[in-house]
Amino acid sequence: MAERAVARVVAVPSTPRGQRTRQRILDAAERVFGELGYHQAGIVEITQQAGVALGTFYLYFPDKRAAFEDLVHALNRRLRTEIATAIAGVEDRVEREIVGFETFFHFVDRHRNLYQVIRQAASVDPELVRWHYETLAKGYVSGLRAAQAKGEIAADLDPTTTAYALMGMAESLGMRWMLWDRRFPSAGARRTLRAFLERALRPPKRTAAP
Amino acid sequence: MAERAVARVVAVPSTPRGQRTRQRILDAAERVFGELGYHQAGIVEITQQAGVALGTFYLYFPDKRAAFEDLVHALNRRLRTEIATAIAGVEDRVEREIVGFETFFHFVDRHRNLYQVIRQAASVDPELVRWHYETLAKGYVSGLRAAQAKGEIAADLDPTTTAYALMGMAESLGMRWMLWDRRFPSAGARRTLRAFLERALRPPKRTAAP
DNA sequence: CTGATATATGAAACAGGCTTCAGGTTTGGC
DNA sequence: GCCAAACCTGAAGCCTGTTTCATATATCAG
């Protein structure tokens, strides 16, 4: 039988010191990947920015791609958490959407580099992109379903289609405003977005049941 | 004074034979870039698929990136042409949107690989991505303005914001349906998309002026 | 303080793919 | 048929960046 290749043990750091170092590398990787792009980014650059030696990188990640994947996972998690927190207190579902969009724009603004990372993932690992969007969509869809049950969103809309449509809108506008213009949307643009969502999502008016 | 680096002359082929060869390389590049991603894709693979020798590539392109850029430009042009043609005969502007979306999905389906290329451009040259979307948006915006003038689209929507919102929707849904599911949207999904666009874009009903 | 464990170092080995170039081959006008 | 221009060839050079590893340092419980 073929000898099994022993996977290099990549430490999950067991001491605070190790965890700090790992995080420093990840932070630097976010910067470097975001600024230079996956392929321009070098381990040398990442470790230099992290203030550690080249070899240290390989203590925590089996290779370059692994660090990239970690970053995408972190991005996904943070994004979902932030949006969930932001909309938690909002009653009306259409209003929730609007708050969700705004939160997303803030996120892209604050994690500018991190968000570039996702757009690059297409040429690193397409499955990772899919995973990202499907994960986001999952939560989105169940939220929409719940809102439909309560009559807050038009009942005839297919939730999955709606979810992808909304995610696409958010991303496109986020790219335009936050990554290119580097500023938040004007009042007029905001009004348009709000009107767009209101009309598309809000159920046709009828006399409210008492 | 420093000697000026002479830019290598990259032929615009002057004979039919040369043009064929150049096109063969471009076609192969579309396949290979699309399937493998920019960085996995090698000139060796591209030229092999094109049925030419390695060196031939450098007769027509100064380097790998140049071929990639050419591809993006071609994608952009083809896409705009196809959509323009498809919506040419359609009267109602909201209906035009729907036809435009359908055409886009067809395009993604037929040029599956070519379309992956754009998503990868983020890690090759961000400016190229921006160019692509801004070019598309430009035409979109003027179309929307015209429609607003004719009262076919709600007048209170900012055209630029609307254009980016719609492009984002199209791309997200196109990715989901054409690249992942590899099939055209179900009737239910189509209805949802139509309803979404109708409600968001169509001006509020009022008795039509005679 | 001491040994055991975890972490860190960075020069050098290594790999893989881009690019060059010194010729060969094809084409088409005359 | 002949020749000049255009086109094509592919082995080898080259360069850049990833990954390894033998060695050094830090931490901490006992």
Image (cartoon, coloured by chain):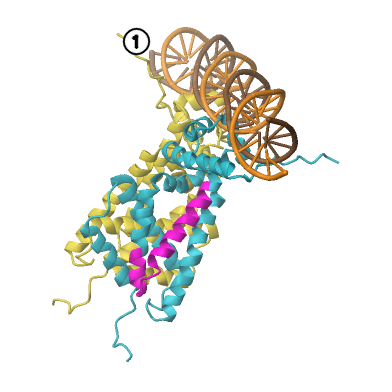
Chain colours: A yellow, B cyan, C orange, D brown
Q: For this view, does A202 lie left or right of residue B96? A: left
Quarter occupied by the C terminus of chain A: bottom left
Vertical side of A65 occupied by B206: above or below: below
Question: In the rendered image of this protein, does residue C21 appear above or below residue B25?
Answer: above
Whether residue B55 is visible here, answered yes or no, is yes
- Pointer 1: residues within 10 angstroms few (<14), some, or many (20+)? few
Q: Main secondary structure of the magenta part?
A: helix
Q: Quadrant of residue B7?
A: top right
Residue at 50%, 46% in the rendered image:
B121
Image coordinates of residue A71 in percent, x first then y, are: 43, 39
Residue B96, horizontal then vertical, whole percent? 36, 69
Q: Nearer the viewer, residue B183 or A202?
A: B183
Quarter holding residue B116: top left
Name which residue lies at 38% across and 77% down. Answer: B154
Residue B86 among those drawn in magenta: yes
Chain identity of mark 1: A
Can the viewer see residue A44?
no
Count of all numbered marks drawn on residues in the image: 1
Question: Which residue is at the front of the view, A25 or B127?
Answer: B127
Residue A64 point in image, percent of width and height: 48, 31
- Residue B72 belongs to the span the image colors magenta: yes
Mark 1 element type: loop
Q: Which residue extends farthest left?
A: A210
> Type of residue at label 1?
Glu
Residue A18, placed above or below residue A123? above
Residue on which disc 1 sits:
A3
Describe residue C13's horizontal placement relative to residue B99 as left or right. right
Tell me the residue at 24%/58% (across/down).
Answer: B189
Bounds of the magenta segment:
B71-99
